[in-house]
Amino acid sequence: MPLQRPRVLFLLLLILGITALWTAVGTAGPETNTVRQYTAVEVSYDDELVLTNAVTGEERRATTVNVDGSIACLPSFSRDCSLARQEYQGEINASGIQSAFSYAYFDGEFYRISSNSSAEFEHEYERTEPETVFNRLAADSGRLTGTERAVLEDGETVTTGPVVHANRLVEYEGRYYTIQQTGFKAYRGPLASGSFCSSSGDDFCDRADRARLSSRLVQFGLGVLGTSGAGIGGVGLFRELRSTDRE
């Protein structure tokens, strides 16, 4: 026997209410107490790596930025870089830690790191063209999240959730970028007064408050809609089923 129209409506309300509640729960939790700003930095090569801020156009030295976690010496002041450089110069043998990196960047040149087939725990450093490194490491646009696309399209975005491909080379519309966290604000309570903020000197700290408030309003609205829909739909469907059993 086909479902009666009221029963179908109550069932839809129940399903939509549960979906809204599930979405509200997904946007809840500690992430709403942390707001981050991400900035797109274009990565190009002209005798050496050139990193250009997509918002300000400012260029930075590549060796001070974590362009991609698979490249040793980006940044250059890390312990891993020091060990990789000593190994490259033949001063030490690898202890195994350099195996976490696929490439190294020394003095404006890229080198592919590969295991030495004839010597255990040793690695070989083969000079490699930058374009080859970019092609092999960069995540393509099809793997980017909506937030990451917003960063690349607008140059910068503020969000209550982390970015999956931060500090990773990504390819977008034929160009290469790395997505850098340039602002961070953590809240200890419901009010902005109990918070800690760190940024590059722009107005991120104020925008973080607005982004967090917007996220909480969306969460609250979904919660109200979900509770109402699930409640009305569930009660109505229950009454319809009971009335059917009595007939």
Image (cartoon, grey):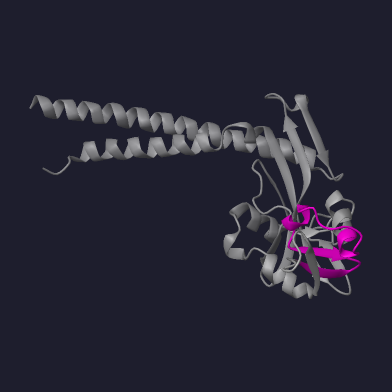
x 67%, y 54%: residue: 165
**In the figure, residue 84 lies in which quadrant?**
bottom right
Q: Quadrant of the C terminus?
A: top left
* Residue 61 in view (yes/no): no
Q: Position of residue 77 (x, y in %)?
A: 90, 51
**Considering only vertical position in the picture, is 87 above or below 186?**
below
**Considering only vertical position in the picture, is 161 above or below 177?**
above
Q: Is residue 95 magenta?
A: yes
Classify residue 61 as left or right of residue 186.
Answer: right
Q: Position of residue 128 (x, y in %)?
A: 79, 74
**In the figure, residue 11 lies in which quadrant?**
top left
**Count of residue discs:** 0
Q: Which residues are magenta?
A: 85-113
x 39%, y 35%: residue: 17
Q: Quadrant of the N terminus?
A: top left
x 86%, y 74%: residue: 46
Q: Position of residue 200 (x, y in %)?
A: 85, 46
Q: Position of residue 26 (x, y in %)?
A: 52, 38
Seen from the viewer's position, the closer of residues 193 and 101 is 101
Q: Is residue 180 magenta?
A: no
Classify residue 150 as left or right of residue 37.
Answer: left
